Amino acid sequence: MSTLFERFTAGELDAAFELLAEDIVVVVPGSMSAEPDVYEGHEGMLRYLRGFDGTIEDVRYEPLDYFEENGLLIVQMILSGRGVSSGIEVSVPSATVAWVRDDKVTRLEPLPDLEAARERARAAG
C-alpha cells in the first residue's frame, strides 16, 4: 500500500493506477472536504486528483502507520502540499480505510482520524 502513495506523490499516475481496480470507488466525506463526493473508476480517481489543480501544488501522501481492522487496511497518513497562490504549507492528517481484492485497491475512504477509520471498518463487516 505504501507503494501506491509513493507513486501518487511522485506523480507516477500510470504506475499508481496499476494498483487500483478498474472499478475503484473513492468516498470523500464532508468531514474531509468542503466538496464531499464519490469518485468511481480510474476516471473518477483522475477527477479527484485534478481537484487539487490551481489550489494546492506539490501534493504529497505520507503514510505514517498501517493497521488492520475487520479484514480491512487502515493507513494513518498526512496529506500535504502548498497553496498555489498563498505559498502556505497545508497538512491534513487522516486515516484511510482501504478495501483490497486480488492485490488491487477497490475502495478508499479517508476519514479524519484513526478511531473514525476503525469504526468505519467495523461497520463494513
Image (cartoon, rainbow, N blue to C red):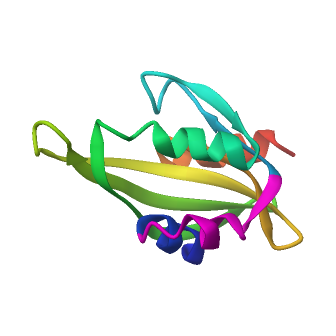
Horizontal side of 120 relative to 65 (left or right) equals right
* Residue at (67, 40) in percent of width and height: 44
Instruction: Determine which quarter of the picture holds residue 77.
Output: bottom left
Instruction: Determine which quarter of the picture holds residue 27.
Output: top right
Horizontal side of 90 relative to 76 (left or right) equals left
**Image x and y of residue 42, in percent:** 71, 50
Residue 112 appears in the figure? no
Q: Is residue 22 above or below residue 67?
A: above
The one nearer the camera, 100 or 60, is 60
**Image x and y of residue 64, in percent:** 43, 69
**Image x and y of residue 82, in percent:** 21, 49
Considering the image in quadrants, where does the N terminus appear?
bottom right
Residue 105 appears in the figure? yes
Instruction: Determine which quarter of the picture holds residue 123.
Output: top right
- Residue lying furthest bottom in this view? 3
Q: Which residues are magenta?
A: 10-22
* Residue at (56, 44) in percent of width and height: 110
* Residue at (87, 46) in percent of width and height: 125
Magenta highlight on residue 44? no
* Residue at (65, 52) in percent of width and height: 97
Horizontal side of 110 relative to 52 (left or right) equals right
**Image x and y of residue 114, in percent:** 52, 51
The one nearer the camera, 4 or 58, is 58
Magenta highlight on residue 18? yes
